[in-house]
Amino acid sequence: MKSLVLVNVTEPLVAEERNIPVAGPGEEVIKVIACGVCHSDIHVADGHFGGPLPIVLGHEVVGEHPELGRVLVYAPWGCRKPDCRQCAAGLEMICANSHEAGVVDDGGYQEYMRVPSRDYLFPIGDLDPVNTAPLACGGLTAFRATKRVLPHLAHKGATAVVIGAGGLGQFAVQFLKKLADVELTVLDMADDKLEAALKLGADHAVKKLPEGVRYDAIIDFVGANATLAVAGAHVQRQGIIAVVGLAGGRLEFGVGIIPSEAVLTSSIWGGLDELRELLDFVRAEGVEHLVETMPLADAQEALDRLRRGEIRGRVVLTV
Ligand code: NAD
Ligand code: ZN
């Protein structure tokens, strides 16, 4: 089978011919149909996570399973040891010994993929495989982040900001508008992303937040020093900043430094139950996908284009 392999960080992926994986006890092997290209793949390829090499990237996977049919793969695999509090709660993405597909274990930039348990396979029925693949990370991460800020948006006249309306932010725009009665502003630096945000339901799309205005919830899908500084300057008293983006920025914290009782939190991927809930939500409510496809063989070009900001929403590799 064909695998696109990250052999060395910061170097182009290498096309290799590998043996089709064989399922060990309790494991499953799926034939990959579609794999989304997440900005986190760039962080892995740049060596920001320090994971093992070589590695096959890709954690937004829809594949074909011989008995279950088309499945979406839950990819942040935990240790599943009985004494792991996070795994016991289905929050495997926060497990201290997680081994995510495409980060620690081989992921979906290949024709077949090994999955450690059938519990991680979610049949998608007649949902479109290309549109559904990005739900595994982009959708799920935005869903969890949205749900975590909702308690701060329960009052009349609530306002929120999404910083960074790329693959993840575009889901968050839709989830926030559907799950809360909120006036939503999107902040991005790219015109095409601002245009997309308005199309997906944002009330305002700006390159700079208006001076002196404060918001009840800010989700930062960039996470750089500059965007965190904006979030810190614009969060309301008792508001919340949820940081999702992995740009590695920092924000000063302390009483009198941030507005009174504002909450700062990171938000990490999503749990098994949340993925189930997200699929139900998508079936019931529908969700818009700004998706384009590229063949697996062009995975490196897809990463390069994403890095240059040339992808309007999500690019999905078709296998
Ligand atoms: P993307 O490249 O599709 O989108 C990023 C968006 O941010 C783009 O629209 C870009 O124009 C905008 N942007 C970049 N710098 C900006 C700035 N300084 N000010 C305003 N806008 C800016 O990326 P994505 O796939 O949506 O991922 C977003 C981030 O979330 C990445 O860092 C990714 O690694 C991270 N991520 C985190 C988790 C998690 O569990 N916390 C999960 C998945 C992805
Ligand atoms: Zn991702």
Image (spheres, rainbow, N blue to C red):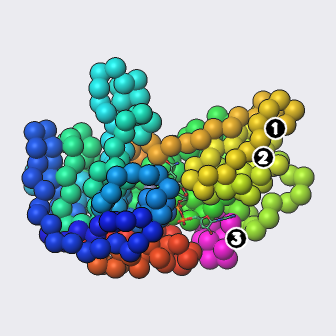
**Observer-nearest of 144 and 181:** 144
Q: Residue furthest front?
A: 8
Q: Is residue 308 visible?
A: yes
Query: How far apart are the alpha carbons under marks 2 and 1?
Result: 7 Å
On the image, the x and y values in percent for residue 192 come to 62, 77
Residue at the spot 57% in from the left edge and 75% down from the top edge: 309
Give whichever of discs 2 and 1 has the lower sequence position.
Answer: 2
Read off the magenta span: 188-203
Give whichever of discs 3 and 2 has the lower sequence position.
Answer: 3
The residue singled out by tag 1 in the image is 258
Residue at the spot 11% in from the left edge and 48% down from the top edge: 23
Residue at the spot 27% in from the left edge and 55% down from the top edge: 106
The residue singled out by tag 3 in the image is 189
Tag 3 and tag 2, C-beta contact below 8 Å: no
Q: Residues within 10 Å of mark 1 (few under 14, many from 20)?
A: many
Q: Label 1's element?
A: loop
Does mark 3 have its CB less than 8 Å from ligand 1?
A: yes
On the image, the x and y values in percent for residue 96 come to 42, 33
In the image, taking residue 60 as reference, residue 231 lies left or right, namely: right
Q: Residues within 10 Å of mark 3 (few under 14, many from 20)?
A: some
Figure quarter occupied by ligand 1: bottom right
The residue singled out by tag 2 in the image is 232
Query: How far apart are the alpha carbons under marks 3 and 2?
Result: 18 Å
Q: Amino acid at mark 1?
A: Ile
**Observer-nearest of 249 and 173:** 249
In the picture shown, does residue 213 fall above or below 79?
A: below
Tag 2 and tag 1, C-beta contact below 8 Å: yes
Residue at the spot 67% in from the left edge and 51% down from the top edge: 249
Q: Amino acid at mark 2?
A: Gly
